Amino acid sequence: MDFFDKISQKVSEGYNAAAEKTKEVAKEAKLRMTISDCKSKIDEEYKKIGKSIYEKFIEKREDEVAMGLIEEFKNIDSLNETIKNSEAEIART
């Protein structure tokens, strides 16, 4: 029985190691998807900013440019923070 117990233990250890590695890979993939999603959202915010600036320029409302973009700037800051945190989490794994 000792022989079969050792084999069973080794198989169990191998399974546990594989399961743990799978969890790590899945977690990293999820973090990388979060980073990609944030970068896409940042690009969208940049486009909104550019459009807003141009529209205000055309309408001769340059004084409203900065005030109208504060929310987009905050969104970009928040997305960049999420990217930074996700990259740090990936580095820890």
Image (cartoon, helix red, strand yellow):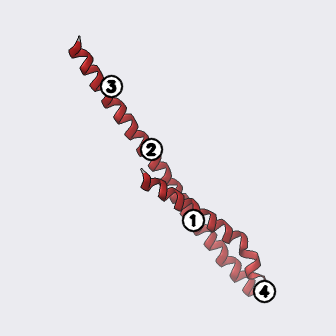
> What is the CA distance from the residue labelled 2 to the residue labelled 1?
22 Å
Crowdedness near tag 3: few (<14), some (14–19) or many (≥20) residues, C-alpha within 10 Å: few
> What is the CA distance from the residue labelled 4 to the residue labelled 3?
68 Å
- In the structure shown, which secondary structural element does the residue marked by tag 4 occupy? helix
Picture quarter containing residue 78?
bottom right
Crowdedness near tag 2: few (<14), some (14–19) or many (≥20) residues, C-alpha within 10 Å: few
> What is the CA distance from the residue labelled 3 to the residue labelled 1?
42 Å
Q: Which residue is mark 4?
A: 63
Q: Is residue 39 above or below residue 23?
A: below
Crowdedness near tag 1: few (<14), some (14–19) or many (≥20) residues, C-alpha within 10 Å: some
Q: Which mark is residue 32?
A: none
Tell me if 16 is positioned left or right of 65 in this view: left
Question: What x and y, as percent, mark residue 81?
Answer: 58, 63
> What is the CA distance from the residue labelled 3 to the residue labelled 2?
21 Å
Q: Earlier in the sequence, mark 4 or mark 3?
A: 3
Q: Which residue is found at the position 45% from the left and 49% from the top? A: 29
Q: Of residues 10 and 35, which is closer to you in this image?
A: 10
Q: Which residue is found at the position 78% from the left and 82% from the top? A: 64
**Three-letter code for the amino acid on which mark 1 is drawn:** Asn
Q: Is residue 76 above or below residue 20?
A: below
- In the structure shown, which secondary structural element does the residue marked by tag 2 occupy? helix
